[in-house]
Image: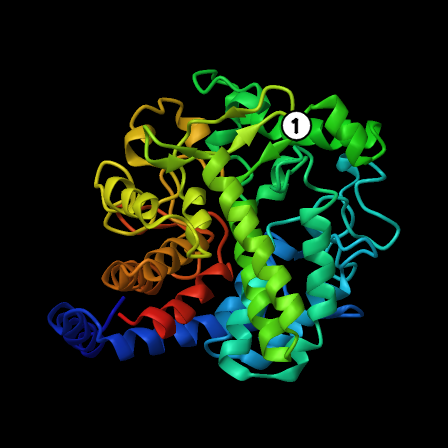
Amino acid sequence: MIDRRQFVKSSVAAAAALTAGPLSAEDLREKLLGMAKEVMARNLVKTSRGEFHVPSISTYPRFYAWDAGWHIIGQAAFDPEGGIRELQAVFNYMRDDGMVPHEAVVPEKAPRDENLGDDYFDAEGRCRITDPPAFLVGAEVLWNKTKDPRILELLPKMQKCLDYLSGPRDLFGDGLVSIIQGWESGTDMSPVYDQPFGINARDPLAFVKVGQAHHAQVRKCSELGWDLENIKAADYFVFEDLCVNGLTAAGARSVSILYEAAGDAEKAAAARGLAEKMTAAMEKIMWDEKRGFFYPRWSVKRRELQYRTTASSFAALLTGMVDQRKADRMFDEYLLNPKRFATPYMAPFNSEEEMRREINPALKSALWRGRCVWANMSWIAARAAAVYGRKAVARDITRSNAEMVAKAGFREYYHPTTGRGLGARTFNWPVVVLQMIEEHGM
């Protein structure tokens, strides 16, 4: 039972909230900063390989390289020292051949997943698949903020990572990176994988079959001894993903900038050359002139583009090396089109017009399916817009994400119309919004 004094106090507070209006940019940033510090502290782990953050201690209690990249970018805005420690930890997990694992067991937090087979993890608890190298872009973001020499000391390891992705992972032989398992994309259940996974979106069991497909890919790779040439020959799942390739090209450009800072002009030119080569390959292979958009490609034998429209394609623009005309078409016909990506909270991962054709409610609730805004995809869209001179667009995306996160909290993803938080709670990725504010303003 509430007493009269409490009732009056709560009524005054409610009235004040109704009349206060939207938060100022500074108040909004301060609110997000407080939330970020609380969530990141909860998800911080210290291990023999270094200090980093698990994505969400209650849901994802492991090291994930993809996630670490976004943590690094976000921390650049408010805890660069923590960002440097996380960057160091990423490379402490790297294998001798330059592969940074998608995930690794944190023994203190979570056991191995035996359902994935005994050899999914190596003897050191690192899995045998990789992730998009957002951490390479994060290294440049940190450098721009701190000029800390510890970042440049990691250049040999960054180069080794690039050498692995651009060398052994070029399974098509066309200058692009191939993934061999859906988790390697970072966008696990994206509709671009329906055909490769053998998924009929109208099938009532499609949700279950998507999950089964991921496990089947792990088993197939295991049967093939995790040998890339065997995997290529089998052509079970070999895929050129736009998020992976866009971030690898952007990562090469970032490494080039770091080499310049280190005074190594020759290596800077080589890294920039890799970014240019990859961007040119994406334009040649993945660009569809009729549709005005980039699409990923599947199968060494079939070499088929997958015509589903997702925000991963905006990653191709991060280097700023794509032809301006193509970039303008992507912004005008897609990002700023209410029928596609221009929702109240931007930028959704899937095109709105394609989501209206999705009729399977269970499948639409799967990760990266349905109507969903992920903070890292908003970061990609905003930075791509800014690179091509659309600074007002970058600010608008930043403001909408800041308001969304402030309202719904640090969640795994959000609804693009209502801003409602979805998926895992106390999830770290929204820390990137603080870096977006610093870079683009509100």
Indicate the position of residue 95 as horizontal and vertical percent values: 80, 56
Q: Is residue 408 above or below residue 332?
A: below
Name the spot of residue 100 as percent of width and height, x first: 72, 55
Q: Nearer the viewer, residue 344 or 318?
A: 318
- Asked if 234 appears above or below 140 in the picture, the reply is above
Q: How is the image coloured?
A: rainbow
Q: Residue at x 58, y 66 (%)?
A: 256
Amino acid of disc 1: Phe
Give x and y (percent) for residue 329: 28, 42
How many numbered marks have been drawn onto this rendered protein structure?
1
Q: Quadrant of the C terminus?
A: bottom left
According to the picture, the residue beneath numbered tag 1 turns out to be 237
SS of the residue under disc 1: loop
Judge whether residue 426 can be spotted in this image: no
Q: Position of residue 124 (x, y in %)?
A: 85, 55
Which residue lies most toward the right here? 123
- State the residue in front, 36 or 256: 256
**Residue for point 49% across, 60% down:** 429
Q: Specify the quadrant of the image occupied by residue 72.
A: bottom right
Whether residue 55 is situated above or below residue 333 in the rendered picture: below
Q: Is residue 267 above or below residue 412?
A: below
Q: Badge 1: how crowded within 10 Å, few (<14), some, or many (20+)?
A: many
Please tell me which residue is depicted at 64% across the width and 56% down the height of the picture: 65
Q: Is residue 433 left or right of residue 152?
A: left
